[in-house]
Amino acid sequence: DAEITQSPRHKITETGRQVTLACHQTWNHNNMFWYRQDLGHGLRLIHYSYGVQDTNKGEVSDGYSVSRSNTEDLPLTLESAASSQTSVYFCASSGPQETQYFGPGTRLLVL
Amino acid sequence: QKEVEQNSGPLSVPEGAIASLNCTYSDRGSQSFFWYRQYSGKSPELIMSIYSNGDKEDGRFTAQLNKASQYVSLLIRDSQPSDSATYLCAVGGSSNTGKLIFGQGTTLQVKP
């Protein structure tokens, strides 16, 4: 069965460190998305991609970057982790019908 | 700023009752609408999608869409304690960009 996976599932890091969160999907979807979810803010879009070599900024992209070198993967990098980036991060993918399927999430704690 | 609004709740209903969850959106040109369920500590999972005005039924779930009023709702019949979760309304844009705007979710509590 097609799926979308994220790793690690939990991560503790220190302020200033670079962190990369992995997202891998086997749906063969062109569209991939990264969200963060915080209490009181719901799901907020960080970055998204419509295909290989395509990346776009979402509403909360400062301090984050992505790259898309193949269809299956969209890693999210926190260039210099800040305490404000403590959150739950979800990756999602979608095909032509816009229905997004979510990964299990990564809980990130920045100390 | 395109918005999707939901009452955060909690909405509390007794087991066996009908739960009604509501959502309004600001982009009049939106073409696609989704309901996701999210259990505490888990990721959102798709319950229903709806694209045309009217009702769409799937088991105990019915999605209702009224584009003129910019309103979409989810009815859960015969509510069960296992339905207790946060329900997220998501709306696609007018130009089929693939991006969805999510509401903040309504927490539903079904009491035995």
Image (cartoon, coloured by chain):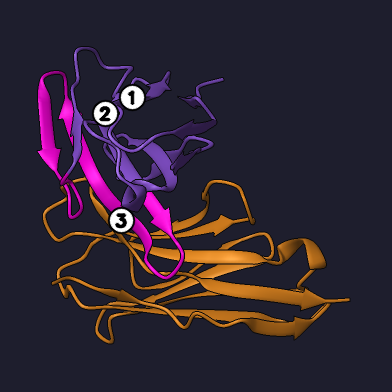
User: Observer-nearest residue: A18 or A60?
Assistant: A18
Q: Which mark is residue A44?
A: 3
Question: On the image, which quarter does residue A15 sit in?
Answer: top left
Q: Are marks 2 and 1 on the same chain?
A: yes
**Is the residue under label 3 in contact with that under label 1 (CB below 8 Å)?**
no
Q: Residue at 17% across / 24% down in the picture?
A: A51
Mark 1 residue element: strand
Q: Is residue B13 something that shows in the picture?
A: yes
Range of magenta residues: A36-62
Q: CA distance from mark 3 to mark 2?
A: 16 Å
What letter labels the chain drawn in purple?
Answer: A
Name the chain under label 2. Answer: A
**Residue A40 left/right relative to B2:** right
**Residue A75 left/right relative to B8:** left
Residue B77 is situated, as x and y percent measured from the top left of the image, at 71, 74
User: Observer-nearest residue: A108 or B61?
Assistant: A108
Q: CA distance from mark 2 to mark 1?
A: 4 Å
Q: Are marks 3 and 2 on the same chain?
A: yes
**Is the residue under label 1 in contact with that under label 2 (CB below 8 Å)?**
yes
Query: Quick one: label 3, few (<14), some, or many (20+) residues within 10 Å?
Result: many
User: Observer-nearest residue: B91 or B105?
Assistant: B105
Residue that mark 1 sits on: A20
What letter labels the chain drawn in orange?
Answer: B
Mark 2 residue element: strand
Compared to residue A28, the image places residue B4 above or below, namely below
Task: Say which label, 3 or 2, has the lower sequence index.
Answer: 3
Residue type at tag 2: Thr
Residue type at tag 3: Arg
Q: CA distance from mark 1 to mark 3?
A: 18 Å
